[in-house]
Amino acid sequence: MKQLVLALLLLGLAVPGSAQAGKAPVVAAKQVKKVATAFKTRVPAAPRVSSKVLKQQYALVSRSLDIARQVHSQQVAQILTDASLAAQERLLVLEKLEVETAALIASLNERALKSQAQWGERLLVERNPNFLPKKDANIPGMLSESAKPTEYPDMSPAFFREVVALVPEYEELPEEVNMLAVALGKKLGFMEQTITQLKEVKLAANKKVAISETEMEKRFYRNQVKKADRELAKLSKQAAQAAADLVDLMNLYPSLYKDALTLVAAKLDTYPVKTDFVKYLRGKVRLPSMVKEEAPRRRIGFN
């Protein structure tokens, strides 16, 4: 219990059963709504904070979650074996404890999601060479529109949705590898949403150009189209780099990531239009049959 109290005080949270615990459900009620979406979009890491510091923060929150669950189990056991409590009184105490603990765990879960997102983002910014190579300044853009949408999809981050779903976390890997994989998957998902929104803006602006009656209106909407095109060009390069980073990361452990690597290779091989990006990324994929040794090409871990 002392461990939990110390950890929660460091995090600024109330302890179940304490005088402040009654306030916890009110705070947590607002926070619970954010839990499902806290890590769906990119959360920028705090400026000038190293990944090592963010790793420690994430470890503290994760440890607090474990302790909170352990203490809750102990408290429930004590209440159930307390002979001084009548049956109805025992039920009321248990219900109150459940509410307090649920609020605490919800708040800790939110903090864990945010800490995880910030840690992963910082790792992407730092680009430790033991995990990721330098960015390729000449990487070809990812985006290309399908000439036959009913037969094959556009080349966009959505193309890698199934691949990301096949990238699990492994306890035997360095935590940094797992965090980078999660961050890259979320980054691709965030870019997919942004690209979709920009395409909708561009489509709407083009329609306005066609129906606008004055030259001033037409010029305004043409500028909107140009702005959207510029943003899409940037995102095309960024999405290509994120996909390449994910493949490079999986190449470090081709046997563990066999399913995801096999899927991305198959999807690229069967994509009917061999764009520069498709050829570039396919050339990066190293299937387990191509690797003679389990050891990665770059040494894993920090110096």
Image (spheres, rainbow, N blue to C red):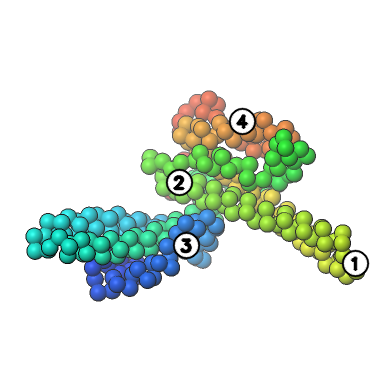
Pointer 2 residue: 178
Q: Quadrant location of residue 198? A: bottom right
Residue shown at 43%/65% (left/top)? Answer: 31
Pointer 4 residue: 266
Badge 3 element: helix
**Labels in figure, total:** 4
Q: Earlier in the sequence, mark 1 or mark 4?
A: 1
Which label number is shown at residue 213? 1
Q: Residues within 10 Å of mark 4 (few under 14, many from 20)?
A: few
Pointer 3 residue: 34
As shown in the figure, which amino acid type bears the numbered disc 4?
Ala
Image position, residue 229 (x, y; %): 76, 56
Residue shown at 55%/34% (left/top)? Answer: 261
Badge 1 element: loop
Left or right, residue 162 beside residue 113: right
Image position, residue 41 (x, y; %): 55, 57
Image position, residue 213 (x, y; %): 90, 67
> 265 and 293: which one is in front?
265
Q: Residues within 10 Å of mark 3 (few under 14, many from 20)?
A: some
